Image (spheres, rainbow, N blue to C red):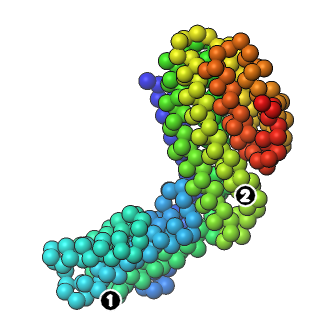
Amino acid sequence: MSPAPALASGWRRLVESTPGIVQISVTALASWAFAHYVLGHPYPIIAAVVAITALGFVADTRPLRVLETVAGMTLGIALAELLLIAFGPGVVQYAVALVLTLSVARFVSATPGFAISAAVQCTLVMIMPAPDGGPFTRTIDALIGGAAALAATALIPRDAGRAAMRAGRRLIGEHAAVLDALADALAHGDAPAVEAVLERARTIDAAVESWRTAVDSGIAIARVSPFARRRRFDLERQRGMLTAMDLATRNLRVVARRSAWAAREGIPKPELGDLVGRVGLVAGILADSLDDVSLAAVARQSLSEIAKHLDPGRMLPAEAIAEQNVVHALRPYTVDLLQATGLGIDEARGRLAPL
């Protein structure tokens, strides 16, 4: 296997992660430096660890998510330090501290990561030698790292708008790819290929959730960061597109299912394939409109032209009910895409051919 795809994927991942690398590195260094040089803590490892873990490379960098991670880690550190002061180090003490930390964390938060963050920090405190500086030195370091991480989301924000745009392009691009593959399979009467496309369509939900997380995270950051506010309009536009594409993703599966039934006998369906292919081409234009908003109008016009002809009886008068059902399924799907271009639901439905 050629290493080129792996190298390209790795390079793309590195480029996309560069803002996060800068943000995490600067924040961890600042946390450690403040605890060490200003407060005089000799080895403020916890300050850097909390900052790194709270920010991470996750898609969701909302301040609330960062705060929750910080709270979980600080809880584990504080409970461990309390037990160390009361009972000292030891295997039994560590076991008690770990069980107590996990129990309290699960009671406080339903998020599994909250409890795990608390348990990891509890383990570090109970096992590592206690630093100079007196009781709760590591708790103070955790608070420093957490405060730095929260400040970084506003002062050194990642380009949340571009992250959301990439996620949106992946989702809508996958729609275009599914429709293109479906069109080719229908045109050639390739029933196994249509079934494969149906399976592919069933996996798109993950892309919807990735886009949702990226958009929600971007909007939350834009609210608190003066450097990201210019992205708010575009992120709100993406949120509207996301709502429509969520519905479209469900309807795409319906189109694929009905296509699989229509193609079950392996007979070529060139007219049906051509129709599905034209919708796929417009989906590609819609994906490009994330970068160039003017293309939304182009996609809207093209979809309107398709929609006004989506009358199964007129488009495929000589075809069986199975083929006409594919056209029926394309009607709500086309309405969803029209909404993604910015139309309201009533106006989008009004562009369909009457039945």
Inspect the image, locate mark 2, and give the three-letter code of the amino acid beneath it.
Answer: Glu
Q: Which residue position holds label 2?
A: 236
For residue 26, which quarter of the picture? bottom right
Q: Which residue position holds label 1?
A: 135
Residue 172 vs 148, above or below: the answer is above
**Residue 16 on image: x %, y %:** 58, 48
Q: Do labels 2 and 1 touch, CB within 8 Å?
A: no
Question: Would residue 351 be seen by someone viewing this image from the given angle?
Answer: yes
Q: Is residue 66 left or right of residue 325?
A: left
Residue lying at 58% horizontally and 26% vertically, measured from the top left = 258
Give how far apart the Cα atoms at labels 2 and 1 are. 47 Å
Residue lying at 55% horizontally and 23% vertically, measured from the top left = 260
Q: Is residue 176 left or right of residue 79?
A: right
Depth order, front residue of 325/182: 325
Inspect the image, locate mark 1, and give the three-letter code of the amino acid beneath it.
Answer: Pro
**Residue 129 on image: x %, y %:** 25, 77
Look at the numbered disc 1 and give the secondary structure of its residue.
loop
Question: Would residue 283 be seen by someone viewing this image from the given angle?
Answer: no
Q: Residues within 10 Å of mark 1 (few under 14, many from 20)?
A: some
**Residue 43 on image: x %, y %:** 37, 77
Residue lying at 45% horizontally and 86% vertically, measured from the top left = 39
Q: Is residue 113 left or right of residue 233?
A: left
Depth order, front residue of 333/110: 333
Residue lying at 68% horizontally and 54% vertically, measured from the top left = 239
